């Protein structure tokens, strides 16, 4: 039995989701004529109390579209040094939007309103880029699935308003945070100018992300999506998976979080592990002892049929997900306890 904990993106649709997908009514979405896509967009806009939404093939494209909406070339985005929009989107902010990034030295991918204040450039100083956007990631990927303190996000919003900065949320795994913190989509919809939501991670859809914002921003996003090559035809079959995921796969995220905590406890008890970051949602970040090369640990698990990933800088990662069962959990814990390196 192979157990894949590399990411929650490795999931495959459940039989029920596949049946729902195959019964979708479709049309040509390039002409705005796919009824299932329209239904997904309206469903998510209503859920977050935003004016409009737009379906995309990937989370990277939704984030990059939002950055392009909110900035002009030679301006600057403020984000954490571990932010996905900076580290894992192929340099897209620089390439697609022609902007630079001011990186905050945060805590597990999260920063404070005071740090944002210090990162903002004087708009009268023409020697430096104009600060125009703050981007937040919740939950934090490289930070181990950490959830932001909502009150800190509110304080950052006030800083943005005071300094005329746009405020974007990379909410690739936002539903994990909502479930764990007992928060609501409406809270986030009210706070952020734009929000990117990924449907193909914890929610288990095979593909797709949605960008939420004002009607004006989403109208512009349609053009940018076309520019990026993201316009799709009879994509309602895939959008249907997103609708099914929102209806049936949100509350079950708590199961992923609990399984991650169980693995975290096993790792904490292992003599080969130096540190495990706090486990809040479905991502575990941990470090091997100084005398154990991280690749040795990865290979030892691989020999036991357990796949995990390295994030560089000594970080190892496991991610629980829809296709990770209690039987698999027992196997992973047993292997960690009996591991001999």
Image: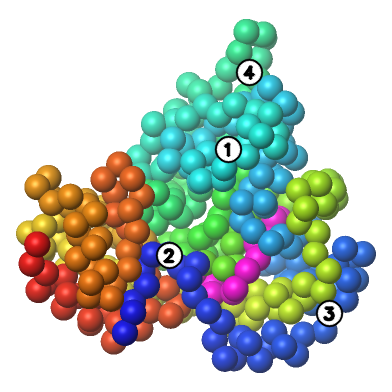
Per the image, the residue denoted by label 3 is 26
Q: Quadrant of the C terminus?
A: bottom left
How far apart are the alpha carbons under marks 4 and 3? 45 Å
Per the image, the residue denoted by label 2 is 7
**Residue 172 as seen in the image, left or right of residue 112:** right
The spot of residue 281 in percent (x, y) is 38, 63
Report if the CB atoms under discs 3 and 1 are less than 8 Å apart. no
Q: Quadrant of the N terminus?
A: bottom left
Badge 1 marks a residue whose secondary structure is loop
Is 205 in the magenta? yes
- Vertically, is 154 above or below 294? above
Disc nearer the start of the sequence (4/2):
2
Disc nearer the start of the sequence (3/1):
3
Disc nearer the start of the sequence (1/2):
2
Per the image, the residue denoted by label 1 is 91
The spot of residue 277 in percent (x, y) is 26, 52
């Amino acid at each position: 039995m192979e157990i894949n904990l590399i990411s929650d993106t490795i999931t495959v649709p459940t039989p029920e989701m596949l049946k729902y997908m195959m019964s979708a009514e479709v049309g040509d979405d390039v002409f705005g004529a796919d009824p299932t896509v329209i239904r997904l967009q309206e469903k998510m806009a209503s859920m977050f109390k935003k004016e409009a939404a737009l379906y995309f093939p990937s989370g990277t494209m939704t984030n990059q579209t939002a950055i392009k909406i909110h900035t002009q070339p030679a301006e600057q985005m403020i984000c954490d040094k571990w932010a996905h929009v900076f580290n894992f989107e192929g340099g897209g902010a620089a390439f697609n939007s022609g902007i630079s990034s001011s990186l905050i030295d945060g805590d597990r991918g999260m920063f404070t309103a005071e740090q944002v204040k210090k990162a903002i450039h004087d708009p009268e100083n023409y020697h430096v880029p104009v600060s125009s956007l703050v981007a937040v990631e919740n939950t934090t990927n490289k930070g181990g699935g950490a959830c932001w303190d909502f009150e800190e996000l509110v304080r950052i919003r006030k800083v943005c308003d005071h300094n005329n900065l746009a405020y974007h949320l990379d909410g690739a795994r936002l539903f994990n945070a909502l479930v764990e913190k007992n928060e609501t989509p409406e809270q986030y919809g009210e706070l952020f100018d734009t929000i990117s939501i990924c449907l193909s991670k914890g929610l288990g859809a095979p593909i797709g992300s949605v960008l939420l914002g004002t009607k004006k921003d989403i109208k512009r996003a349609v053009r940018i999506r076309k520019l990026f090559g993201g316009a799709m035809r009879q994509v309602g079959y895939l959008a249907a998976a997103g609708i099914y995921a929102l209806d049936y796969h949100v509350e079950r995220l708590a199961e992923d979080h609990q399984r991650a905590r169980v693995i975290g406890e096993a790792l904490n008890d292992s003599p080969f592990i130096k540190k495990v970051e706090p486990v809040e949602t479905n991502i575990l970040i941990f470090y091997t002892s100084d005398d154990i090369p991280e690749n040795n640990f990865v290979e030892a698990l691989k020999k036991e049929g357990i796949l995990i990933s390295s994030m560089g800088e000594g970080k190892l990662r496991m991610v629980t997900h829809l296709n990770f069962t209690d039987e698999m959990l027992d196997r992973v814990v047993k292997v960690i306890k009996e591991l001999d390196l």
